[in-house]
Amino acid sequence: MEIATFGAGCFWGVESAFRILPGVLDVKVGYEGGTTVDPTYKEVCTDRTGHAEVAQVAFDPAVVSYDRLLDAFWNMHDPTTLNRQGPDVGTQYRSVIFFHSPEQQAAATASLQRLVASGRLKRPIATQIVPAQTFYPAEEYHQRYFEKQGIAPTCHI
């Protein structure tokens, strides 16, 4: 099992999009990349803690590659918007890849370069690629939020 961590806007949709991929063993939503220790959702929403809403993905690399997770990441959100996804605005909604190893860093950087070279996006990519930091799980009511609400995943990756 390996771990990958992605921020792509509101973590509810990111979680549900990754959860449907074969080889993904579990997804936890939480906060990463800020300065407050063990932040709450309310604190993160003030846009003062520096944390991003993220999905931490546990996956079996024999079934799904990190590159496939990166492809899904690029396709589930608009990586050209700075600190925003749709109606959600703030640094907590930034596009970010938290890498857990030099191999993940290299793969994420190469993936970003391929996306730029493809010409698919007409604006510059705002996604950060940074070392993993302390992951703080979000409150229980955020975990599997869409499932609890009876909402089917709407993101097609």
Image (cartoon, grey):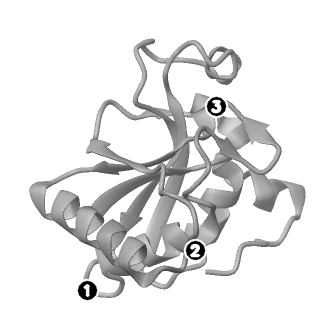
- The residue at the point 79 percent across, 58 percent down is 146
Extreme left residue here?
102
* Camera sees residue 119: yes
Q: Is residue 4 above or below residue 94?
A: below
Q: Is residue 22 above or below residue 91?
A: below
Q: Is residue 101 above or below residue 52?
A: below
Instruction: Give the amino acid type for the residue marked by disc 3 in the picture.
Output: Glu
- Which residue in the protein does label 2 denote? 75
**The quadrant where residue 132 appears:** top left
Q: Residues within 10 Å of mark 2 (few under 14, many from 20)?
A: few
**Residue 23 position within the rendered picture, expressed as x and y whole percent measured from the top left:** 42, 81
Query: Mark 3 against mark 2, which lies toward the viewer?
Result: 2
* Camera sees residue 1: no
Q: CA distance from mark 2 to mark 1?
A: 22 Å
Query: Mark 2 against mark 1, which lies toward the viewer?
Result: 2
Q: Is residue 138 above or below residue 22?
A: above
Q: Which mark is residue 62?
A: 1
Instruction: Specify which label sits upstream in the sequence, 3 or 2.
Output: 2
Extreme right residue here?
150
- Which residue in the protein does label 3 denote? 139
Name the side, left or right, on which 151 lies relative to 62. right
Instruction: Specify which label sits upstream in the sequence, 3 or 1.
Output: 1
Instruction: Give the amino acid type for the residue marked by disc 2 in the picture.
Output: Asn
